[in-house]
């Protein structure tokens, strides 16, 4: 019920300011619980959906949620099909060659998940000779191909596909955001598996947290998103939105 109330609030806040600037906010069209997923009626729900509503309301922006395939979301931004990205996109030096980012709005660890009792560790030696599944066009693909050279890297269009192949025994491990994998572990299929630890930090690849992706030079919109993020953190809205989803803050250090 709390999630439903927050989702309803988010939908309402997207259009509260009739005279506000209209902004098409791109999200990944692939489900990514607990951040964003379509319900049975096709309505998008989740923490990031609620966060879009809260940030846009605080920034006095009229935001329209626009699903886009993950591997085409940056081209959709640079070509003007969307105006911003709020899809758990990490702020990395590589991406900043093409787009810009707001300040972060969350930052969580990157972890490796395996079948229970596998004995696998989240290191190159621990994954040697193993099949590691990661989602394509993510920091996890870049990290795995850089740091786990002795593992076989298998790419997936969605994290859910990697999770299901782990359940079926077709891969030995998967790497992803800790919150996303924790949500899977709490699902009906997740009893098979466990998180075996966080990978070693590499900010050059994993980034400096998750921010709003923006076109280069769009400084006015960047300032509005930064102001909106700062406002909801200061007035407690950030924690109110997060409380139904997470036991503690995911804003990170």
Image (cartoon, rainbow, N blue to C red):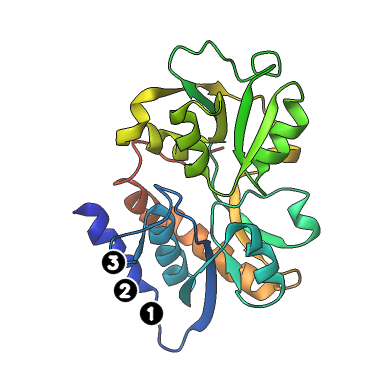
Q: Is residue 1 above or below residue 183?
A: below
Judge left or right: residue 244 versus residue 117.
left
**Contact? badges 1 and 2 (CB < 8 Å):** yes
Q: Quadrant of residue 204?
A: top right
> Dot 3: within a 10 Å radius of its alpha carbon, few (fewer than 14), some, or many (20 or more) residues?
few
Q: CA distance from mark 1 to mark 2?
A: 6 Å
Give the residue number, with chain letter if any, for mark 3. 41
Give percent across and percent down for residue 202.
Answer: 71, 32
- The structure residue drawn at horizontal position 66% and vertical position 70%, both measured from the top left corner, is 77
> Dot 1: within a 10 Å radius of its alpha carbon, few (fewer than 14), some, or many (20 or more) residues?
some
Q: Secondary structure at mark 3?
A: loop
Q: Is residue 36 above or below residue 155?
A: below
Mark 1 or 3: the one toward you: 3
Give the residue number, with chain letter if any, for mark 2. 12
Mark 3 or 2: the one toward you: 3
Q: Secondary structure at mark 2?
A: helix
Q: CA distance from mark 3 to mark 2?
A: 17 Å
Mark sitting on residue 127: none
Judge left or right: residue 224 versus residue 150.
left
User: Upstream in the sequence, badge 3 or badge 2?
Assistant: 2
Considering every residue shown, the one lying at the far right of the view is 97
Give the residue number, with chain letter if any, for mark 1. 15
Taking depth in this image into account, of 124 and 6 the one nearest to the observer is: 124
Q: CA distance from mark 1 to mark 3?
A: 20 Å
- How many marks can you see? 3
User: Upstream in the sequence, badge 1 or badge 3?
Assistant: 1
């Amino acid at each position: 019920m709390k999630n439903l109330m927050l989702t309803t609030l988010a939908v309402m806040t997207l259009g509260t300011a009739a005279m506000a600037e209209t902004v098409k906010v791109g999200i990944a069209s692939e489900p990514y619980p607990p951040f964003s997923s379509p319900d049975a009626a096709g309505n998008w729900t989740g923490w990031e959906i609620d966060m879009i509503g809260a940030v846009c309301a605080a920034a006095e922006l009229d935001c329209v949620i626009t699903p886009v395939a993950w591997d085409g979301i940056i081209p959709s931004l640079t070509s003007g099909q969307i105006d911003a990205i709020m899809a758990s996109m990490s702020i990395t030096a590589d991406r900043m060659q093409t787009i810009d980012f707001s300040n972060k709005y969350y930052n969580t660890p990157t972890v490796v998940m395996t079948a229970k009792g596998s004995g696998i560790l989240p290191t190159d030696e621990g994954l040697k000779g193993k099949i590691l599944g990661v989602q394509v066009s993510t920091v996890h693909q870049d990290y795995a191909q850089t740091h786990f050279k002795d593992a076989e890297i298998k790419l997936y269009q969605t994290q859910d596909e990697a999770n299901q192949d782990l359940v079926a025994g077709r891969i030995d491990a998967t790497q992803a955001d800790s919150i996303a994998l924790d949500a899977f572990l709490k699902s009906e299929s997740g009893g098979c598996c466990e998180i075996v630890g966080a990978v070693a930090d590499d900010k050059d690849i994993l980034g400096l947290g998750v921010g709003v992706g923006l076109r280069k030079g769009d400084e006015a919109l960047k300032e509005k998103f930064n102001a909106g993020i700062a406002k909801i953190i200061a007035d407690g809205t950030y924690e109110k939105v997060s409380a139904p989803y997470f036991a503690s803050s995911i804003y990170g250090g």
